[in-house]
Amino acid sequence: MIPGFPDAQPIAGLIGGLMIGLAAAIMLLGLGRIAGVSGLAARATGLSSSGAPRGVAVAFIIGLPLGAWIVALLSGGVPATFPAPGLLIVAGLIVGFGTRLGSGCTSGHGVCGLSRLSRRSIMVTALFMGSGFATVALMRLAGAI
Amino acid sequence: MRIMIALLSGALFGAGLTISGMADPMRVRAFLDLFGAWDPTLAFVMGGGMIPMALAWIVQKQVDRPFADHAFTLPDTRAIDGKLALGAILFGIGWGIGGLCPGPAIASLALTPAAVAPFVLAMLGGMAIHRFTIKS
């Protein structure tokens, strides 16, 4: 627990983060590819004509819920609260389009690109973090949260 | 072999996302909520993720090829243009509204399928719009 931040889960966050980084390291050193979820999801669903071999993309994308399911099974449930479906649809459309236009998301640019010190990933990550902070601040100002 | 490695990587990634609390959109949004009850957990997740990857990039420079494939296929790290910047800004807006990015959304299909389905379907719709409107 961090003083002043009663809801923070730094230890769980760090352990989960290390697992994510290890997963990305396996993709890089095993298959020579970036573990970027948006790119692999587009590839797996046929919405991208370039990138990893289709089978690799499909296997990785199936792995995501499989791993989540195993954790839920062992831990007896994972708490989650979602915004209203209307907001989720708007958010999903923008995230899908934006991650393709921006060539990646939190995993490819954030975890893989930042650790590579890629200038492009540092810029993209700074921009999506900044616009995320601004969006939530505006939602608060508008009384939406 | 390659399929099994990809499945293992995906499963470890999904497990990590779930353990770290990132499958809860409200926790992710709380990280982005600087003027509310700010929750720094996501910073620990990203920091934790970068530790093994920083080591992996060092190893990558020392070896000729990945252990289960012929060659490294890595993105160009230089080209920065307006499209990339606009895409990043849009992604951040959607991330703030929904509290979800692609990884946790897809992982959540095993946890809270009904709640996350509208986001995942819309996300694929957004990717399809990109596919059929933007020439790369």
Image (tube, rainbow, N blue to C red):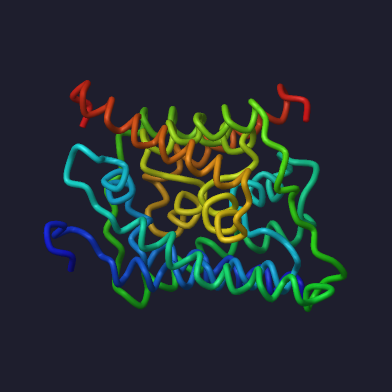
Q: Which residue appears at 25% of the width and 65% of the height?
A: A9
- In the displayed structure, B102 sits above or below B127; it is below
Please give the count of numbered marks on the rendered protein: 0
Q: Position of residue B78 (x, y in %)?
A: 71, 43
Q: Position of residue B26 (x, y in %)?
A: 28, 46
Identity of the residue furthest to the right in this view? B70
Between B125 and A19, the residue placed more toward the observer is: A19
Q: Which residue appears at 78% of the width and 78% of the height?
A: B67
Q: Position of residue B17 (x, y in %)?
A: 43, 62
Q: Which residue appears at 12% of the width and 57% of the height?
A: A4
The N terminus of chain B: image quadrant: bottom right
- In the displayed structure, A56 sits above or below B86; it is below
Between B118 and B23, the residue placed more toward the observer is: B23
The C terminus of chain B: image quadrant: top right
Task: Give the quarter of the image for residue B115.
Answer: top left
Q: Which residue appears at 57% of the width and 68% of the height?
A: B54
Between A65 and B28, the residue placed more toward the observer is: B28
Q: Is residue B38 left or right of residue B54?
A: left
Q: Position of residue B31 (x, y in %)?
A: 30, 48
Task: Give the quarter of the image for residue B47.
Answer: bottom left
Between B16 and A61, the residue placed more toward the observer is: B16
Q: Is residue B85 left or right of residue B118?
A: right
